[in-house]
DNA sequence: ATTGAATCTGACACCGGTGTCATAATGCGT
DNA sequence: ACGCATTATGACACCGGTGTCAGATTCAAT
């Protein structure tokens, strides 16, 4: 089984390789008869164009990079899944690049990624969507990029956003409507811009109900389960403990539930808990967590699609779209019993 | 900033491009003086070889594919992480390829993946490590491959194994030593070869303690949380309920815990539960799950490393290595109280 | 039949590297 | 100083596609 190149097809079909190339790329100015001959040859020889050669000729790699650093495996998998689907649609490949660096080192790392792998474009997922130095670097290097779930705005890019503040507002309101007045909050990782966005929604809801934010029951977490445990221990042992806890993601919320069990605080009877993200764990623990679901796959799919379109047509310069979150009610929340 | 090619370096250093190529690849027969000149030019111009051109010349893509279909996101992430690390070491890229197909469709899908992406090699993770048609196909197509955690043997390949039977035996023994005599078992997905391997370990341990396997408390799961719930409900509502449950993975074990809470069966006082895999959920629920940890990253790292070495040297033909599992004891197991 | 425009087709260089092989430069023994 | 083996270097074709442009063919209009 010798390999089938454009030359063998050309010979087989009795035309020049350029004509074969024209058929391959659906270029105009090929007579129907010729086109048919060439297509028959494709079938007959089972010809597959070599993407590497094509890449060399175009000075393109047909590879999109995906940059992430997220403690949630399920989030990463969902991002990948959406990105992959978009790549397949356009015959691109996806190169995943987990990266824990920040600042100068991050720039160096991405620079070396770009020069070694010759990416055609790059998708930034949180927390990288909001790293101004990184964005500036890509802009300066003229590397097309798209940002998933950024909070900051940037006039010349593709940004696929979610409205975390709104969603956090909504879920806090749910607790308020259930009668909770003393609601603790566990913040996320300070590098992630959604951290402040979610906190802002929480504060706004409290404010509208004329409740002051009590920083004694606001803990600094970092999205990890462990940080949730520490925060929960502090909050639940407070002299005036809250009747509800809003953790900035589901892992930390799960940790709150664990600490509550350890302290024999029953959920949701004595304590309501809400999380964020609708990670698998939210329904894998008992009671299940009330949380916010976001269409992560869809967001990433859109981001990569728009990015590839930008690369292919250099038409789209700016694209904004906001995807709404959805409140999911499970067993971890209940009305406050009036004592 | 015009782009730096091998030609510009050659011109700058005053040598031919072939000489530059020689320096680049550490080939012999370059005088120290010339080598230095060229290396200085590299630095000066910040030259990065174009992997696509190199790929074309070598008829290689420098891409390794990773095939998987696993319900556990954390498992996937760990596989990716090990594979990526190995790829980086050898300057390869990793192409991830989730795939839910089986049989004929699977072969077609992989065939098209190979011809479109020109992979240099492919890593098979469970359940693909044990699909005989797929392995036969790759062998016939002469595509180098490595198998992670296969159960079946195959004389001519790279196989990085774990001893699931032994580990299952060990964890079952732990329950037996705690005094449990009636131990339920929830099987995994029938497509995964580890499913039978783990069951075999369970049976062996029971046999050595002269306990017959009671198929009434052996459930057919599929590794999903949901299947674990269904199985747990059946098992725990049995007329003669078990005092311990061994679920083939941690998700199903977590589901058993949930069902137990719903039925007000306290864990571990009335019921011991063990899982398998040491997934994050094993320590994110309360009580934490006693389980088996396997060095997934390390296994995949080794698999990819050996695969790339095979590609580069066509030396290694066969490579076997078995990684042991490790028992992790948490709060979900306790000694059976003698009534 | 003739002409001009529109449509088709192929020769050839090129993308940025690597392999082959011939030739130039060096080292070494006598 | 000479000859010979060894090392160093470059010219050139090639990997498998694509862009450019000139030449060939077709077609409609006169």
Image (cartoon, coloured by chain):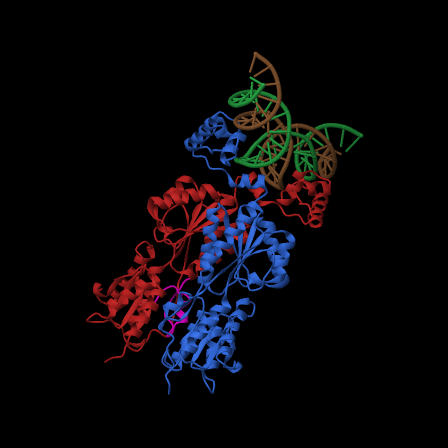
Chain colours: A blue, B red, C brown, D green
- The vertical placement of B27 against A81, above or below, is above
| Residue B77 left/right relative to B217 | right
Q: Main secondary structure of the magenta part?
A: loop
Please identify the quarter of the rendering in which residue B185 is found: bottom left
Q: Is residue B287 above or below residue A57?
A: below
Observer-nearest of D2 and A132: A132
Closer-to-camera residue (C1/B89): C1
Q: Relative to residue B205, is residue B286 drawn left or right?
A: right
Indicate the position of residue B14 as horizontal and vertical percent values: 73, 40
Residue D10 position within the rendered picture, expressed as x and y whole percent measured from the top left: 70, 34
Quadrant placement of the C terminus of chain A = bottom left
Queried whether the magenta region covers residue B286, the answer comes back as yes
The answer to whether residue A95 of the structure is visible from this angle is: no
| Left or right for A156, reference A326 | right
Picture layout, residue A239 above or below residue C28? below
Magenta run includes residue A244: no
Q: Is residue B127 above or below residue C15?
A: below
Residue B186 visible, this orientation? yes
Q: Residue furthest left?
A: B239
Q: Position of residue C16 (x, y in %)?
A: 62, 41
**Tag count in the figure?**
0
Which of the image's four quarters has the N terminus of chain A? top left
The magenta-colored residue range is B275-294
Q: Which residue is located at x 32 percent, y 63 percent?
A: B226
Q: Residue B51 placed where, x, y %?
A: 58, 45
């Amino acid at each position: 089984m010798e390999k089938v190149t454009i030359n063998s097809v050309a010979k087989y079909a009795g035309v020049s390789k350029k004509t074969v190339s024209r058929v391959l790329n659906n270029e105009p100015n090929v007579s129907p008869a010729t086109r048919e001959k060439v297509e028959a040859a494709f079938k007959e020889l089972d010809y597959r164009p070599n993407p590497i050669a094509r890449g060399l000729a175009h000075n393109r790699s047909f590879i999109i990079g995906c940059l992430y650093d997220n403690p949630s495996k399920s989030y990463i998998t969902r991002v990948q899944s959406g990105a992959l689907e978009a790549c397949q649609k356009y015959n691109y490949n996806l190169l995943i690049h987990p990266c824990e660096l920040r600042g100068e080192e991050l720039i160096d790392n991405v620079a070396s990624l770009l020069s070694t792998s010759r990416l055609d474009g790059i998708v930034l997922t949180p927390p990288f969507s909001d790293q101004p130095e990184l964005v500036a670097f890509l802009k300066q290097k003229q590397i097309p990029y798209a940002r998933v779930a950024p909070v900051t705005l940037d006039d010349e890019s593709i940004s696929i956003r979610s409205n975390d503040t709104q969603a956090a507002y909504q879920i806090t309101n749910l607790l308020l409507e259930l009668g909770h007045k003393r609601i603790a909050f566990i913040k996320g990782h300070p590098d992630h811009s959604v951290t402040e966005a979610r906190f802002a929604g929480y504060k706004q809801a409290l404010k509208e109900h004329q409740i002051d934010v009590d920083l004694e029951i606001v803990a600094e977490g970092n999205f990890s389960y462990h940080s949730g445990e520490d925060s929960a221990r502090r909050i639940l042992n407070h002299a005036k403990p809250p009747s509800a806890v809003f953790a900035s993601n589901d892992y930390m919320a799960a940790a709150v539930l664990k600490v509550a069990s350890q302290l024999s605080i029953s959920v949701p009877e004595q304590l309501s808990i809400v999380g964020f993200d609708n990670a698998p764990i939210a329904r894998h623990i008992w009671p299940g967590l009330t949380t916010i679901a976001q269409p992560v796959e869809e967001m990433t799919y859109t981001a990569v699609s728009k990015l590839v379109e930008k690369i292919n047509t250099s038409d789209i310069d700016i694209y904004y779209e906001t995807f709404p979150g959805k409140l999911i009610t499970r067993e971890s929340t209940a009305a406050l019993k009036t004592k």
